[in-house]
Image (cartoon, rainbow, N blue to C red):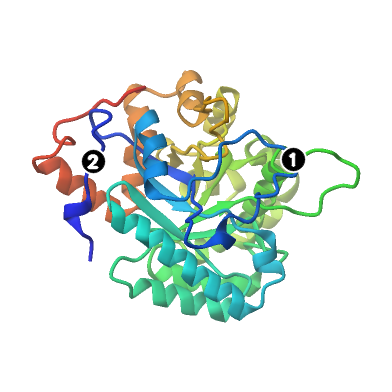
Amino acid sequence: MVNYEAAKPSTAFTGLGRIDVHHHCFPGTEPELMSEFEANSYNLNYTPFPTTPQEHLNFMDEVGIQTAVITPSIKSAWHNKYSPAEFLELCRKSLKAQLDYVAYNPLRFGCFAVLPLPHVEESIRFIREAAELPTPPDGFGVTTSMGQRYLGDPQFEPVWAELNKIASVIFIHPADTVMPPHLRIGPFVQEFPFDTCRAITSVLNSGLLLRQPHVRFLFSHNGGAFPYLADRIGRQHMDNVITKTNEGLTTRQLLSTKNIFFDTSISSPMQFPVVKDLGIPTEHLLYATDFPYTKRFDDITYLEGYTAPRDSGLFTDSDMEDILRNNSLRVFPRLAKMYARLSQGDHPLKNGVNTNGI
């Protein structure tokens, strides 16, 4: 059960605020969840990982975020080297820690539970366990490939079918793949966008969007490299195959009519004309920050998740309100209920329409 008494909106800004759908968490109660980048071998300039809800709220208040939907960074070793039982247990512990954040303030936190793919039986068991919790997760998180299998792999079909039953949102974050030798560039610079492209192509080519029409696939970083390559993939090479697995629909038709969503983290204004040209609906763009990787030691915060769509000049003020908040409320029913309840009651949310920076 949701503790509405704990659902206190921010007092640092007025109005409804933003919903951040790409927000990493590293609960201090589970040290393994913060192990992926603790060595910082690429000397990244991000701030220390937050380990408590309040540390997240400090950042959220700073940039006008009312709600963060949190997920850990998924480490490659978990789905490539852990046994099925080990990964399942880690997913359970992770979800428990994430739900502690939600309980701390169920308005200001949602969560994506890490799914123990590529292990199908364990994933289905975990989905069913999570659905029975008093406060289920708001969706599930995976990487672009799990156990060296991309999301459209037939092996994963039973998992998508289970998620289709509950109309789940699936947050998809890129992960390390096999990097070219002697290339002294972190995988997050180039390989992450390309792996996102591979994952989207896998979903489209498999026919998954039509077979499991209620699953909503939310891809990170404005779709990575995919928007730039979409016509090369579709019109120039694969639409003759994609139409056969998708009841005659082309790549562009799938993007404009089916459940493919992009978050806006680490985007730039030049990307949005391409995204719009592909027919991706504004309703399928969700605001995101990629915190804490976008918060630097020198106290500079990258705000492209907001400034990039705004500065593209392609979106009205109403469109920006949708990207920053309303589109997320359409896909996260628990949060929609929270916002509806609070906007009707005696809370700072009532009658508020503007936040700092909007």
Instruction: Please tell me how crowded label 1 is: few (under 14), some (14-19), or many (20+) other residues with Cα within 10 Å.
Output: few
> What residue does disc 1 label?
42
Q: Quadrant of residue 42?
A: top right
Say whether residue 228 is visible.
yes
Residue 171 x %, y %: 50, 54
Which sits in the foreground, 242 or 192?
192
Q: Residue furthest left?
A: 346
Which sits in the foreground, 42 or 235?
42
Quadrant holding the C terminus: top left
Which sits in the foreground, 104 or 83?
104
Residue 226 x %, y %: 65, 41
Residue 244 x %, y %: 64, 60
Provide the secondary structure element on which disc 2 rests.
loop
Instruction: Please tell me how crowded label 2 is: few (under 14), some (14-19), or many (20+) other residues with Cα within 10 Å.
Output: many
Provide the secondary structure element on which disc 1 rests.
loop
> What residue does disc 2 label?
9
> Residue at horizontal 39%, vertical 45%?
68
What's the distance in space between the residues labelled 1 and 2, CA to CA?
A: 37 Å
* Horizontal arrangement in the rendering, residue 341 relative to residue 180 (left or right): left
Q: Is residue 102 above or below residue 92?
A: above
Which sits in the foreground, 26 or 306?
26
* Horizontal arrangement in the rendering, residue 80 relative to residue 71 (left or right): right
Q: Amino acid at mark 1?
A: Tyr
How many numbered dots are placed on residues in this image? 2
* Horizontal arrangement in the rendering, residue 184 relative to residue 149 (left or right): right
> Residue at horizontal 65%, vertical 55%?
242
Do labels 1 and 2 touch, CB within 8 Å? no
Which numbered disc, 1 or 2, marks the residue closer to the eye?
1
Quadrant holding the N terminus: bottom left
N-terminal of the pair, mark 1 or mark 2, is 2
Q: Is residue 116 above or below residue 61?
A: below
